[in-house]
Image: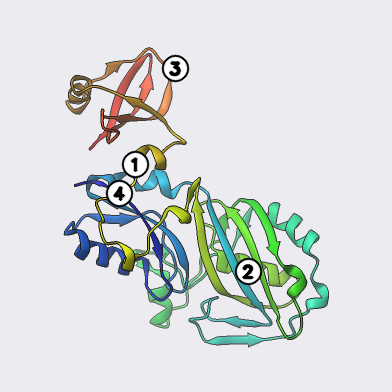
Amino acid sequence: MRGFLLIDKAAGSSSFDVIRQLRKITGIKRIGHCGTLDPFATGLLICALGSYTRLNSLLEAREKSYEATLRLGQSTTTGDPEGEVEETAAPNIERFDARAITEAALALDELAVPKYSAVKIQGQRAYKLMRQGVEVEIAPRAVKVHSFQFINPNELSEQNPCLSYACTVSKGTYIRSLSIWIAAQMQTVAHTVSLRRIAIGDISVDDAVKLDELTDWQAALVPCEKLFGHLISLHMDAEQIRVLKHGQSVPVGMADAEQILVLNEMGGIETLGYIKDGHLHPKVNF
């Protein structure tokens, strides 16, 4: 069995907790997800089943959209509610300039990576090293903020030193770091108190299902064309697919392309390939 499930992750569970539960529900051991969500975060987690886990990188590379809330005047060791309070400061709400911060955010080209993150350092996760008392150094990561907007900024006050915002960002952007950066523009500190992933590319959390509502997982499988509409896809018959799965090319008479998805007559993905000199060549067969 192979396919994709769109899960609306609940707060308090890790992304791997979701995978572990799906293995029990489906009986399938080979399951992966397309982009980690922190335990405190909620929202869209795309889970690949069976051989389709080999397509994860194509979805991980897509831009991601979030809604987040930060609390000004208080930083934590992890940048989220799960860490210990590290520093307190005045929230400096009088320094809030929505337009200036928005313009600066859209011009960002790099952001810090949280030390409590899943980034690997010499083969070990950074957060595991930090928990062992090993201080880590992680270089800033190149990022792109495609869109940014504050949500109800007029609600910011001394009694409510919180800012909510929506953004669409490139792969590898840590929203915890973006919240800290926003606070720095106001010459204060902050941590992210809530985070929800609302989309990956054009795939919306509105189409996802909560784990405790997943009563018929096979009926919940998502058509491949819905997930990979941003890529060129070709429907081929059984004979053409057989040729590709034997490592041979198929003439298609199309312009060169680096990534082509080959679909069977039922819409399932059979091959990831490329076109060169009018022939489709297989890269990965499923």
- 186 and 206: which one is in front? 206
Residue 236 pos. (x, y %): 27, 23
Lower sequence index among marks 2 and 1: 2
Which disc is residue 223 wearing?
1
Residue 111 lies, with reference to residue 133, above or below; the image says: above
Which disc is residue 59 wearing?
none
Circle 1: element type: loop
Q: Which residue is mark 3?
A: 255
Q: Which residue is mark 4?
A: 221
Q: CA distance from mark 3 to mark 1?
A: 26 Å
Lower sequence index among marks 2 and 3: 2
Q: Which mark is in front, 2 or 1?
A: 1
The type of residue carrying mark 2 is Ser
**In this rendering, position of residue 157 left or right of residue 68:** right
Q: Which mark is in front, 4 or 2?
A: 4
Residue at the spot 61% in from the left edge and 50% down from the top edge: 144
The type of residue carrying mark 3 is Ala
**In this rendering, position of residue 5 left or right of residue 11:** left
Q: Which mark is in front, 4 or 3?
A: 4
